[in-house]
Amino acid sequence: MDFESLSEKLRRMGIQIGVQKPLESPKQLRRPIETVIPGREIQTNFGSLFSLGHSYPQDYLHGRQPVLPQHPIYGLARWSRVPELEQKNLDQFIFLDTETTGLSGGTGTMAFMVGVARFQGERLAMEQFFLRNPAEEAALLAGLEKFCDGMAAVVTYNGKSFDIPILNTR
């Protein structure tokens, strides 16, 4: 069997060979985040940003876990070897996580979503700040700064080595 007859058989079966017809790019569905997430527009001195906020009572259970820690915060401060935090109240801690455009942490890496939470009175307040486009980055950082105002410490999973440096470079 020669290649020409094989090519002809494949063509008759509907299989295209070669690059005679370039593949079409798949159509991307683009929907504004406002149509997917029930958030709100927040105005800052640097423009607007999109945010989703929620708060939970301290006795709320996430699965079987209460949102209010069952152990005193001074134990965590002692365990983490940060004695100056032993006397701080739980409402002076911010809980933070980022989602970024890359893992390298270089100049082009941006946080496109920043999730934060803090205890305020009898509730756990949570906020997610979304970057709809790069032009909103300053507004996102301003919204984050306002939410974190007055905090003594940041609690993260990998924030010391990744999240905080990403935000600081921006």
Image (cartoon, rainbow, N blue to C red):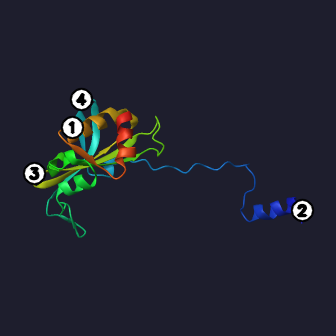
Image position of 5 (left or right of 104): right
Q: Which residue is mark 2?
A: 2
The answer to which of marks 3 and 4 sits earlier in the sequence is 4
Q: Amino acid at mark 3?
A: Gly
Q: Which residue is at 10% across, 51% downward? A: 121
- Of 133 and 83, nearer the camera is 83
Q: Tell me the quadrant of the picture where the N terminus can be found.
A: bottom right
Q: Which residue is mark 4?
A: 45
User: How far apart are the alpha carbons under marks 4 and 2?
Assistant: 71 Å
Q: Position of residue 22 (x, y in %)?
A: 67, 48
Quadrant hosting residue 68? bottom left
- Which of the two discs, 1 and 4, sits closer to the camera? 1
- Which of the two discs, 3 and 4, sits closer to the camera? 3
In the rendering, which numbered label is found on residue 166?
none
Asked if the residue at tag 2 contacts the one at tag 4, i.e. Cβ–Cβ closer than 8 Å, the answer is: no
User: How far apart are the alpha carbons under marks 1 and 4?
Assistant: 11 Å
User: How far apart are the alpha carbons under marks 1 and 2?
Assistant: 72 Å
